[in-house]
């Protein structure tokens, strides 16, 4: 059976091997780790793509003011019972027509302007979410970096403590053989050694978990981490820190933008209920049997349209926006 002193030596060797870090040409700094995690983060990539989608969606706000071109082709074939028919008692006729129409809204009730403001706000919301995701990645990487350093130092401390207690046990056994101490005192020293062994094993597991978390975030092995970290400049007072957070924190900006966008959605809905003025040009060519039925028509139209009463879907949309506005107000107050 392995005695206490030999077990202490084995654990000391294992911890020393665990702490042995292969030499690297350059030490891995916190800045390098954060840069790697920003590149490696899938959540940040998703937020970046969401921002790009919101940016490109701004152009859709002009859809109510765009020119639209439509084309129609139609043809008919009919048989009519007629006394003058010379074939089977029926008179055949064919007709074909082609129509080309070009139209746009001269006035859309302000929909394009209100939608442009709304789409811009939605882009700003996506940008705030991206900044929030970026901040979370930076904080998580910094914590993982410091966790590895702290866990490494704890392992080194526990390893030194284990070696020291192993020497105490060996000395106690020698003094026991000399009759200077009792077996109880030796047992107490061995108990302290056992606790130190357990603590070392626990710290080794914590270090392994910290290194795994660091690898997951950055895609880099936790080797040769720089321990001399220059502290960043901090606000001098708590009030300055509070003002800085209220003005620059992504969560605060996101809450403010969500509240503004909820109000803008109401204005966009109201704009869709206003009268619109549309202008259209159309050309129609009709061809039939005989030349008397052939004709070419050109027309220009100006159409005024206005909803006479709100539909059920509009009322439901208004209720939904009202509930959403109240929710964003509460979220803003809770931020």
Image (spheres, grey):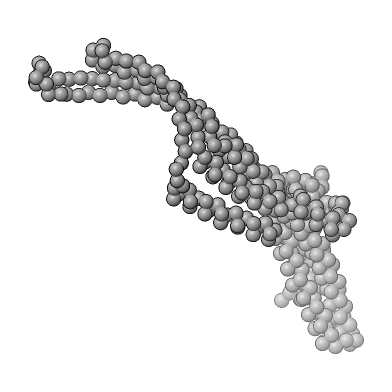
Res 168 → quadrant = bottom right
**Is 161 located above or below residue 125 in the figure?**
below
- From where the camera sits, is residue 57 visible? no
- The percent position of residue 211, horizontal first and vertical second, equals 72, 56
The structure residue drawn at horizontal position 44% and vertical position 22%, both measured from the top left corner, is 300
In the picture, the quarter occupied by the C terminus is bottom right
* The one of 203 and 185 positioned closer to us in this rendering: 203
| Left-right relation of 285 to 312 | left
**Is 272 located above or below residue 286 in the figure?**
below
The structure residue drawn at horizontal position 25% and vertical position 24%, both measured from the top left corner, is 76
- The percent position of residue 217, horizontal first and vertical second, equals 69, 51
* The one of 226 and 325 positioned closer to us in this rendering: 325
- The percent position of residue 295, horizontal first and vertical second, equals 32, 15
**Is 263 located above or below residue 63 in the figure?**
below
| Left-right relation of 62 to 145 | left
The structure residue drawn at horizontal position 54% and vertical position 32%, both measured from the top left corner, is 107
- Number of numbered discs present? 0
* The one of 245 and 327 positioned closer to us in this rendering: 327
- The percent position of residue 184, horizontal first and vertical second, equals 82, 87
The structure residue drawn at horizontal position 16% and vertical position 24%, both measured from the top left corner, is 79
In the picture, the quarter occupied by the N terminus is bottom right
| Left-right relation of 230 to 298 | right
Res 35 → quadrant = top right
- From where the camera sits, is residue 250 visible? yes
């Amino acid at each position: 059976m392995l005695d206490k002193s030999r077990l202490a030596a084995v654990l000391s060797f294992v911890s020393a091997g665990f702490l042995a870090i292969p030499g690297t040409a350059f030490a891995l700094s916190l800045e390098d780790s954060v840069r790697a995690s920003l590149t490696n983060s899938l959540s940040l990539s998703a937020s970046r793509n969401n921002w790009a989608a919101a940016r490109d969606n701004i152009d859709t706000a002009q859809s109510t003011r765009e020119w639209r071109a439509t084309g129609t082709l139609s043809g008919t074939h009919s048989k009519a019972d007629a006394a003058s028919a010379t074939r089977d008692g029926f008179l055949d006729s064919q007709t074909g027509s082609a129509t080309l129409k070009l139209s746009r809204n001269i006035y859309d009730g302000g929909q394009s302007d209100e939608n442009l403001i709304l789409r811009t706000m939605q882009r700003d919301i996506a940008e705030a979410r991206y900044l929030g995701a970026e901040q979370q990645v930076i904080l998580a990487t910094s914590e993982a970096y410091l966790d590895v350093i702290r866990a490494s130092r704890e392992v080194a401390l526990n390893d030194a403590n284990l070696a020291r207690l192993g020497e105490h046990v060996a000395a106690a056994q020698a003094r026991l053989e000399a009759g200077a101490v009792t077996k109880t005192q030796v047992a107490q020293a061995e108990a302290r050694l056992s606790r130190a062994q357990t603590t070392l094993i626990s710290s080794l597991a914590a270090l392994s978990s910290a290194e795994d978390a660091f690898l997951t975030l950055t895609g880099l092995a936790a080797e040769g981490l720089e321990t001399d970290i220059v502290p960043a400049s901090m606000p001098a007072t708590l009030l300055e820190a509070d003002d800085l957070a209220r003005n620059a924190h992504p969560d605060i900006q996101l809450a403010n933008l969500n509240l503004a966008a909820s109000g803008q959605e109401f204005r966009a809905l109201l704009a869709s209920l206003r009268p619109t003025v549309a202008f259209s040009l159309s050309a129609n060519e009709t061809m039939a049997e005989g030349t008397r039925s052939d004709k070419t028509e050109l027309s220009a139209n100006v159409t005024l349209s206005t909803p006479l009463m709100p539909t059920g879907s509009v009322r439901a949309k208004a209720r939904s926006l009202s509930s959403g506005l109240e929710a964003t107000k509460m979220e803003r107050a809770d931020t």
